[in-house]
Amino acid sequence: MPTLPERMQPGSPYPLGAHCDGIGTNFAVFSAHAERIELCLFDPSGRREIARYELPECTDEIWHGYLPRLRGGQLYGYRAYGPYEPEQGHRFNPNKLLLDPYARLLAGQLRWSDVLHGYRVSSPRADLSFDRRDSAAAMPKAVVVDEPMHWEGRTQRPRTPWSKTIVYEAHVKGLTRTLKRIRPHERGTFLALADPYVIDHLVHLGITAIELLPIHAFVQDRRLTEMKLRNYWGYNTLAFFAPEP
């Protein structure tokens, strides 16, 4: 990892999230009531925090900053400072690492623990209490991604008339997990969904479009995890813009 500057540059409030321009990365996150927001960088394992920067600017309630020489692959999270007034709806707790709501890639898994709560679960004051333990070790981290390819000129919309449209609702894993025609390590994946055998099958059925059940990153519910079960359907969103790992 290249040597990073001591401070962030002002950067831009748009677009939201972390965006790499090939020279550095701009970070932007919304908060109407935060008094300060810090960007935390982690090593490739996600276990050790290696740097912390205060976002230097706030424009129309969007905190932002730019780090030169920071490229794709960097793991990060946020810490937000502000009022802790549960009665007023404010629960700022900088001891808790926050996931970028605009993250486009995640690393690591959510590890269920009471430390994830901003309050002491066993406290007599319940959710009006305050938990000072650091939650970073139990949190997945957002990952800076290099900008995606430019799709202009590479794809063409099918433009199927609505009168001829047949939408097939599909679960990415469930659709191909048991298909013996697909190589074992590809079954239940996006790659299997694009396999010519699967495409031909859908075309034969007359399908013109696929609507996928949740494919963004979602939480494995604590109760299910304790029962050694899994959230199959994905209706418990963790990150709307990151694919489910």
Image: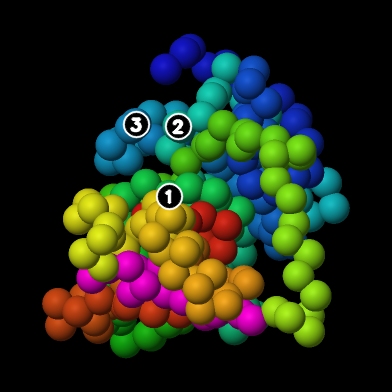
The crowd level at tag 1 (other Cα within 10 Å; few <14, some 14-19, many 20+) is: many
Q: Is residue 32 visible?
A: yes
Circle number at residue 43: 3
Corner quadrant of residue 240: bottom right
Quarter of the rendering containing residue 28 = top right
Secondary structure of residue under mark 1:
strand
Q: Tell me the amino acid under the disc marked 2.
A: Gly
Location of residue 161 in the rendering, given as x and y in whole percent from the top left corner: 80, 75
Q: Amino acid at mark 3?
A: Asp
Q: Is residue 31 left or right of residue 216?
A: right
221 drawn magenta? no
User: Of discs 1 and 3, which sits in the foreground?
Assistant: 1
Residue 224 lies, with reference to residue 17, above or below; the image says: below
Q: Magenta residues?
A: 166-178
Q: Which mark is residue 106?
A: 1
Helix, strand or loop under label 2: loop
Q: How was the colour assigned to the protein in this rendering?
A: rainbow
In the image, residue 27 lies at what x, y percent?
65, 39
Total of numbered circles in the picture? Answer: 3
Q: Earlier in the sequence, mark 3 or mark 2?
A: 3
- Please, is residue 107 above or below residue 111 in the view? above
Q: Amino acid at mark 1?
A: Leu
Mark 1 or mark 3: whose residue is earlier in sequence: 3
Q: What residue is disc 2 on?
A: 73
- Is 116 or 141 nearer to us in this picture? 141
Q: Are marks 1 and 3 in contact (CB under 8 Å)?
A: no
